[in-house]
Amino acid sequence: CEWEERWRGLKKTLREIYVLYADCTLKDPFYELEMPIRCELFTQAIDDLMERIDPGGVSGRNGGEDSKKHCEKYTFYMQTVH
């Protein structure tokens, strides 16, 4: 079923985002929960992931502004998960 494929893809994407989040924040000894994520590696990794998922769709518009919005949304999501 098409929705099952989409759900699997979404779960995989969220898992990848969580791994990026963990690598860039939870392994950083100076990071404290509730802090915004200000890590260029995280931002670049999210941009790369979004480009893989939606080529030309996220980071290809607005000079990266859409990417920043997505990053903020994912940051908020990841902070609310914990």
Image: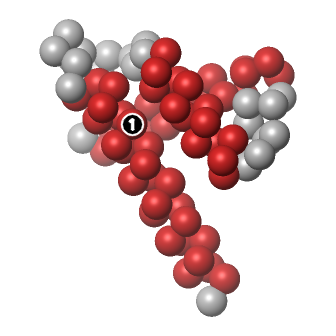
Residue 15's place in the image compared with 80, above or below, is below
**Quarter occupied by residue 69:** top right
In this orientation, does residue 70 appear?
Answer: no
Residue 29's place in the image compared with 48, above or below, is above
Give the position of the C terminus as an image quadrant. Answer: top left
Q: Which residue: 55% across, 65% down?
A: 9
Residue occupied by mark 1: 20
**The disc labelled 1 sits on which kind of residue?**
Leu
User: Callout 1: 10 Å neighbours few (<14), some, many (20+)?
Assistant: some
Point out residue 19 in the picture as x, y percentages from the top left corner: 34, 43
In this orientation, does residue 55 appear?
Answer: yes
Q: Residue furthest left?
A: 29
Point out residue 81 in the picture as x, y percentages from the top left corner: 31, 44
**Quarter occupied by residue 17:** top left
Front position in the image: 73 or 50: 50
User: What element does badge 1 sit on?
Assistant: helix
Left or right of 29: which side holds 18?
Answer: right
Callout count: 1
How is the model colour-coded? secondary structure
